[in-house]
Image (cartoon, rainbow, N blue to C red):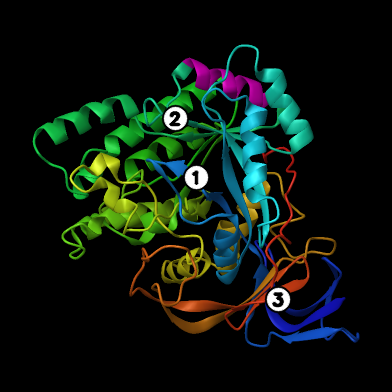
Amino acid sequence: MTTLIRGGHIITASDDYIGDILIEGEVVKQIGTNLDVLADKVIDASGKLVIPGSIDPHTHMELPFGGTYSSDDFKTGTIAAAHGGTTTIVDFAVQGKGQTLQEGLDTWHAKANGKCAIDYGFHLICTDFGDDDAPLLHKIMDEEGVSSFKLFMAYPGVFLMDDATIYRVMKAAGPKGGITMIHAENGIVINEIIKETLAEGNTAPRYHALSRPPAAEAEGVHRAIAMSELAKAPVYIVHVSCSEALDEIKAARDKGLPVYGETCTQYLTLDVSCYDEEGFDGFAGAKYVMTPPIRSSSNHQPLWNGLKNGSLELVSTDHCPFFLKGQKELGRGDFTKIPNGGPGVEPRLAVVYDGAMKHGFSLNKWVELTSTAAAKRFGMYPRKGTIAIGSDADIVVFDPEKPVTWGTEREHMNTDYSLFEGMQTKGDVETVLLRGKVIIEDGQYLGTPGEGQFLKRGATAS
């Protein structure tokens, strides 16, 4: 099967030109101008942007949390991702209490196998790591192609790891080309604030945000960076939500330390007033309960600046949806029982495009933030994250002028609300190819669940 994408405005993280792309089978075969070739399928991309498939390196499909499961499984979640121009996700496998690292990974392979509409990889969340576990971690890196490991400073009694264990994982992963990912909040102190908040009778969703102040996130980031420096290993801070945390990352990078960070679409666009949204008998604010919480709008510009100057290197989603009705409402009367997370894997590419253009970013930077940086950071480049001869033909044809109004009527994620309900942006996905096959065209899913491949990833970028 050959496909010719003709006359598009081709954008990668480094290139910007008008041209044609010939795809043969699953990979890019030829790039040029006015290619004189016969193809089984021709896509006219005149006036459109042609970019590498988007990569979301932070999703949680079918994650057990708060007595329930995130509502997108690997089928529904990856179909929604495809609609939004995302052709690769990296989800989080979880080592359950009492499991080995390998057993946790095997559980997630079973969840995803035969369901994914796009390609996928795994990070591995570690909940236990003893003095003798380094060889198993190295085996997983070598044989499974899992080179990134997530640890939590939050959620005592569930995910939280003590500092000594975090240091051990960093020491084990770093020299082998692995990277430790940190959910950085001072969970111990936050738990004390939560107890005080509940004792005062404050139980509404807005108190989720008030009980997790920016200082708690910044302290966690500071401590993670210190441990990374002691371990002489890189660290990646997930879902940075506030300027205080960003300042810690910037200071470390100014010192030349291997410290990296991401932010998420919601932290760039929403603000704390969302917790006071009316409706659902005063409980509509539960839609936005996620960790870290949505912050004040004063954080938007610093986060965009951090993306522009490289203090933050990409935008992910932390996609972890729940239904407001029947799931989020488990926390009526006690905000600590609201399942944490929200839907975001589908709108990301277009919402970031709109914001990036409004903040003066180049098209190249937009592609870097939504595809190339993740491919490099997590060992998938140049197979993923670019348009080049020999690379996987994961390609999005994007209409830069088409207006979009976001909401549940448009979106395909398996939940009953949208984080961005009513938001208007400019720029939309038109066609999506996964390894040379058209899987989205004019808003229709044409693929087959299960055709997504598991990606064995290499070492992280230095």
Label 2 element class: loop
User: Which x, y percent locates residue 460?
Assistant: 67, 39
Looking at this view, is 200 or 99 the one in front? 99
Q: Are marks 1 and 3 in contact (CB under 8 Å)?
A: no
Circle 1: is it few (<14), some (14-19), or many (20+) Cα within 10 Å? many
Image quadrant in which you'd find residue 18? bottom right
Q: State yes or no: residue 415 in magenta.
A: no
Tell me which numbered mark, 1 or 3, is placed earlier along the sequence. Answer: 3
Location of residue 294 in the rendering, given as x and y in whole percent from the top left corner: 31, 51
Q: Residue at x 34, y 34 (%)?
A: 218
Q: Does 174 lie within the magenta span?
A: yes
Cα separation between marks 3 and 2 = 47 Å
Closer to the eye: label 2 or 1: 1
Q: Which residue is mark 1?
A: 63
Identify whether 344 is placed above or below 187: below
Seen in the image, is 85 located left or right of residue 6? left
Disc sitting over residue 17 in the figure? 3
Residue 398 vs 139, above or below: the answer is below
The count of marks equals: 3
Badge 2 amino acid: Phe
Of labels 2 and 1, earlier in sequence is 1
Report which quarter residue 84 is drawn in.
bottom right
Q: CA distance from mark 2 to mark 1?
A: 13 Å
C-alpha gap between disc 1 and disc 3: 41 Å
Residue at image point 19% right, 65% down: 279
- Characterize the local packing of mark 3: few (<14), some (14-19) or many (20 or more) Cα atoms within 10 angstroms: some
